[in-house]
Amino acid sequence: MGEILVTTNTNVYIANHTPISHRGRFNAVIPVIMGAGFALGPLISGDYIRKYGINNIWPVICFLSITAAVLMYSLYFNEKKRKQF
């Protein structure tokens, strides 16, 4: 579900939050950043699983997911606060 939301909303978010002169640059860089995450995620988690076992990766994934959710909520809160002014 998260991947679907990110894929369908990333370009809309960029279009609404960047100056017109920089939209092309942002639209070019975002797929590179996301691709790096898709490439490095399995590599890093695979090494972690090899060292500590598959059962120990789930707390790490849970922590990263909660951290990402808190950061997304703080982004929402900051944008909402900025629109009030």
Image (tube, rainbow, N blue to C red):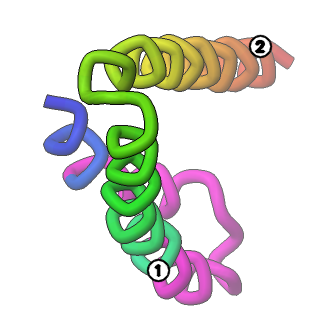
State the mark number for residue 81.
2
Which is more toward the observer, 62 or 9?
62
Residue drawn 23% across and 33% down?
Answer: 2
**In this view, which residue lies farthest toward the right?**
85
Q: Quadrant of the C terminus?
A: top right
The residue depicted at 49 percent of the width and 71 percent of the height is 30
Which of the labelled discs sits on residue 64, or is there none?
Answer: none
Point 65% across, 25% down: residue: 75
- Residue range of the region highlighted in magenta in the rendering: 8-30
Please tell me whether residue 10 is drawn above or below residue 1 in the rendered image.
below
Q: Amino acid at mark 2?
A: Lys
Residue 11 highlighted magenta (yes or no):
yes
Q: Where on the picture, by quarter, is residue 79?
A: top right
Give the residue displayed 70% in from the left and 70% down from the top.
19
Q: Which numbered disc flags the more N-terminal residue, 2 or 1?
A: 1
Q: Residues within 10 Å of mark 2 (few under 14, many from 20)?
A: few
Q: Main secondary structure of the magenta part?
A: helix
Q: Amino acid at mark 1?
A: Val
Measured along the vertical axis of the image, is residue 54 above or below residue 47? above
Q: Position of residue 74 (x, y in %)?
A: 68, 16
The answer to whether residue 6 is left or right of residue 68 is left
- Does 61 appear in magenta? no
Q: Position of residue 14 (x, y in %)?
A: 51, 60
The reply, left or right, for residue 53 in relation to residue 64 is: left
Is 64 drawn above or below residue 36 in the view shown? above
In this view, the residue in front, 9 or 44, is 44
Label 2 to label 1: alpha-carbon separation = 30 Å
Relative to 1, does residue 18 appear above or below in the rendering? below
The percent coordinates of residue 8 (x first, y second) are 21, 51
Q: Secondary structure at mark 2?
A: helix
Q: Which residue, given by chain and number where applicable, does mark 1 sit on? A: 32
